[in-house]
Amino acid sequence: MRVGFVGMSHLGQVYSAATAAAGVDVLLMDDDADLVDRLLTSPTVREPGLDSVWRATASQRTCTTEFLECRNCDLVLITRDVPTSSSGESDLTAIERLVHRLFQALAGSSIPVVVLSQVAPGTTRRWLNSYPDLSYQVETLVFGNALDRATNPERHIIGREHSGGSLHPMHEVWLAAFPAERFVMSFESAEMTKIAINIYLAASVCTTNTIGELVRSLGAQWDDIVPALRSDRRIGEFAYLTPGLGLSGGNIERDLASFIRISGSRGVDNDMISALLRSSAHHRQWVSRQLRDLPLSDGSTIAMLGLAYKAETASTKNSPSIAVLEEFPNYLFRVHDPSADFETARTNVQRCESWEDAVRGADCLLVMTPWDMYRTIDGQLLLRLMRGRRIIDPHSVLAHESRTLTDVDYRSLRRPGPQ
């Protein structure tokens, strides 16, 4: 069997690697020649385990810009990530171009095509007018754990022209390499299922952040409350119960924006979804509120550890760190991140090669991304390097040094303090 992947962004690289690791030959196709050349030797996205799998499966991988090569595949997956604006609006320009060229290349063939890219309800049915054997499959990858989730999926959610429709035999063969519970439904139901999953996740995130804010203001301990919540089966042991800085990364924000857009045109009340976005914006500004509350003068040096919106990813999409850098032009920021790509023309932002360089002489420290390497920071060394004694650590990354940091103005989302 040979499976083609059209669109080599994060989604395509992860799923093609998982497929190759399952012993299947893969064709990687994109109209970006520079990207295709780079993929001959290594992936261009960061995910745990991806580099080693890429090297181990090199003999099973062919990379090309020639769409006609897809005619030599048994199954073709559309895997171009759909970019979004900061407000969650999707830009379908690139994927529409890829899909048009793919359907032209496959014209007259009977090769099944599966859309893994997330598109709005109604899109797959519209594309069905151009290609007859089309399916939509929900992807539920998580940045920082994507390869494992592609290899060991929780379930398969698949849309067909009609609810409960049978799958193409080659699609069945590919799915057999990743056994999981299966749900087959109409295109629109599957497309909406993806949005529904992210809305429930967003509601959980915002609920936790809002309750956590009140808990801190009352002087209560969030960590005391969590075990009791997890013991309630209606909430569950896997619920999102860690206070954070709102929604980021772009994917969940996109689905909230899609719901608001679609529901607005159909007379469906969307006040609750709009409230989630407002709640997220409020909690994203927590670090900024703490900075404004501190007696820092213009020109103060702020160390920032972490630019990525979450650990184990290089993505800074809607990152709270970037928002802070943009909001405080009167401070000098010394920034370190072990992975994230970031360029800025701002003269008040300096990139540092190590966390030690970033914190040296700092008046205040912001620990923005919970990278594991920051969890091993020695508190005594940290205080020797810093000039000030102010630390804003929303994710409690430095909690292991709580005894050392007793004389520090230490602020965390899991401790009582200013909101």
Image (cartoon, rainbow, N blue to C red):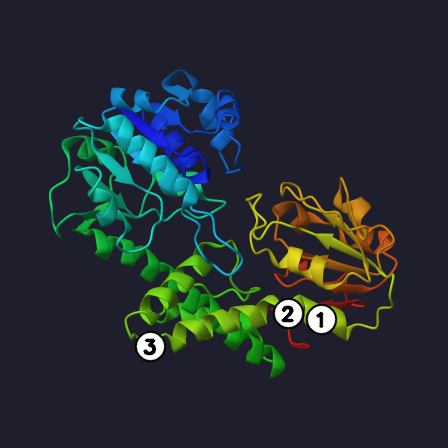
Q: Which mark is residue 208?
A: none
Q: Closer to the camera, 1 or 178?
A: 1
Give the image location of residue 401, x and y in percent.
Answer: 71, 58
Give the image location of residue 355, x and y in percent.
Answer: 75, 46
What residue appears at the point 80 percent right and 51 percent down from the top-left corner? Answer: 359
* Amino acid on which the number 1 mark rests in the picture: Gln
* Amino acid on which the number 3 mark rests in the picture: Asp
What residue appears at the point 32 percent right and 36 percent down from the top-left corner? Answer: 100
Residue 47 vs 394, above or below: the answer is: above
Q: Closer to the camera, 177 or 6?
A: 6
Query: Where does label 3 land, which residue?
Result: 269
Give the image location of residue 145, x and y in percent.
Answer: 46, 44
Query: Where does label 1 land, which residue?
Result: 290
Q: Are marks 1 and 2 in contact (CB under 8 Å)?
A: yes
* Amino acid on which the number 2 mark rests in the picture: Trp
Q: Do the residues labelled 3 and 2 touch (CB within 8 Å)?
A: no
